[in-house]
Amino acid sequence: MKKILIIVIVLLVAILGFLSYEGIWATANIEKAEEGGYVMMGLEHRGAYYKIGDTMKKLQDEVKAAGIENPKFAGIYYDNPDEVVEDSLRSFAAVIISNTADSAKLMAMKNYKVVEVEKGNALICDMRTPDMISTIIAVYKAYPAFSEYFKSHPEEAKTIKYTYELYKEGSTRFVFQYQ
């Protein structure tokens, strides 16, 4: 009985340690900043936002095959999932164009769309996301934090122009850009 108790305690400590590393205790802080000024190229996705992963993977594979070094990826989310049925949600898996050489390589790819996100006022939330589990945890922390923020700042919620995520090495920036 004592061995089982020790094993259970060790497992619980290991699970808590793992979840701590993944960011389960992290706080999603909303800040105001200037964000944007991006030209993005990518693939449109229609359907549940959590299913954009396949489209993003296809984009990443094609960008890698095109020989683009150190690409920066993003996802734009056009619709409010509380107002639009899941099958009709529109999103965009994108790579940020950072130089003309990359632009030329991407232009050679078929079925790519260009989206420009002008610089402007934004609400941002930076979360540590070194892997997929921490990314999922970050999503479930960031978006509720934005919802709480908008409850006390409804004027900003009414002027949202873009909702997007910037994927960096080891972190994700969640952005609500407003007018």
Image (cartoon, helix red, strand yellow):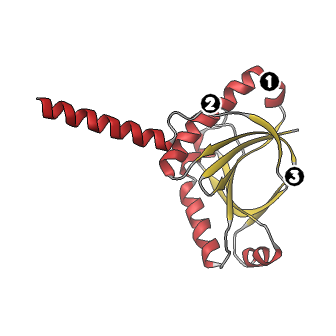
How much space separates mark 3 and mark 1, taking CA atoms?
23 Å
Of the pair 131 and 73, the residue shown nearer to us: 131
Among numbered discs 3 and 1, the one appearing first in the sequence:
3
How much space separates mark 3 and mark 2, taking CA atoms?
25 Å
How much space separates mark 2 and mark 1, taking CA atoms?
15 Å
Task: Tell me the quarter of the picture where residue 95 sits.
Answer: bottom right
Element at label 1? helix
- Residue type at mark 2 is Pro
Among numbered discs 3 and 2, the one appearing first in the sequence:
3
Give the image location of residue 48, x and y in percent: 57, 46
Asked if residue 179 is positioned above or below residue 59 in the image, the reply reads: above
- Residue type at mark 3 is Glu
Tag 2: Cα neighbours inside 10 Å, few (<14), some, or many (≥20)?
A: few
Give the image location of residue 33, x and y in percent: 82, 41
**Residue of label 1:** 154
Of the pair 144 and 23, the residue shown nearer to us: 23
- Residue type at mark 1 is Pro
Q: What residue sits 47% from the left and 43% below the top?
A: 21
Element at label 2? helix
Q: Which mark is residue 69?
A: none
- Residue 167 appears in the picture as rendered: yes
Q: Quadrant of the C terminus?
A: top right
Among numbered discs 2 and 1, the one appearing first in the sequence:
2
**Residue of label 3:** 118
Give the image location of residue 55, x and y in percent: 58, 60
**Residue of label 2:** 144
Element at label 3? loop
- Residue 48 appears in the picture as rendered: no
Q: What residue sits 60% from the left and 67% below the top?
A: 60
